[in-house]
Amino acid sequence: MHIEPGFVAPGKIWLGYITAAAAGSYALKLAADAVKTNGSLSLAARCLVASALAFSFFQVLPHHPVGVSEVHLILGSTLFLGLGLAPTAIGLVVGLLVQGMFFAPSDLPQFGMNVTTLLVPLFGLSALARRIIAPDTPYVALGYSQTLTLSSTYQAGIVSWVAFWTFWGQGFTSASAASVATFGAAYMLVIIVEPLVDLAVLWGAKALHQLKGSGFVERRLYEAG
């Protein structure tokens, strides 16, 4: 999901900073709400875990340039289910920033676009979760079809934003459309794998029932909404 350097001209990068500022402001509001609900220590602990995991997903796990971007196993829905919306949003931003500062400085000019690409689909994922998961259902009780829907929605959002930035930077041409199509097709592997990871993590959480009420995981993981 990293927009490759040069695909968006410097004169057009400004839009990414505007959209990232809006998404980041909403993430901060979510963080403030999380502090009121669970306390600052719980939020800080989950943000730290999410940041470390997100950095690992970006930098340590295999990632390959395909078309206009890179294919990563981001596991956004996994982080959301286990750690909650605000910690996941903050963790994705921090993980992306650390990677850019220390390992991929060429990605820093595209930071705003990449933040938008990660966060806006996450917010959409959260809204969908409220619609398809019954209030009396803890996340550990989710089935494959629900995790597939959540994961597919998040990944589709990422592909959509990558397409938007490509067409914004390169114009709608046959070459740019072909690059986006190639990237989207490559992301099908992520859509297949991520729901299985979600289920494995939820199964592990169910077995580690000691985490219930600990503050290190999302409350909804074990409790009804």
Image: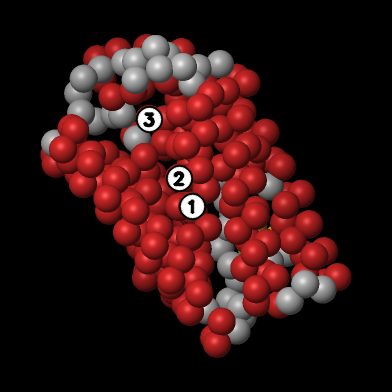
**Marks 2 and 1: CB-CB under 8 Å?**
yes
Q: Is residue 126 above or below residue 21?
A: above
Q: Which residue is mark 3?
A: 82
Query: Residue at position x 64%, y 41% from top?
Result: 190
Q: Residue at x 23, y 41 (%)?
A: 33
Q: Given the image, on which type of amino acid does mark 3 rest?
A: Gly
Give the numbered dot on residue 197: none
In the structure shown, which secondary structural element does the residue marked by tag 3 occupy?
helix
Q: CA distance from mark 2 to mark 1?
A: 5 Å
Q: Give the residue type at disc 2.
A: Phe
Label 1 or label 3, whichever lies nearer to me, is: 1
Q: Is residue 65 left or right of residue 76?
A: right
Query: Residue under circle 2?
Result: 123
| 12 vs 48: above or below | below
Describe the colour scheme in one phrase. secondary structure
Q: Quadrant of the N terminus?
A: bottom right
> Sequence order check: which comes first, mark 2 or mark 3?
3
Q: Quadrant of the C terminus?
A: top left
**Numbered label attached to residue 120:** 1
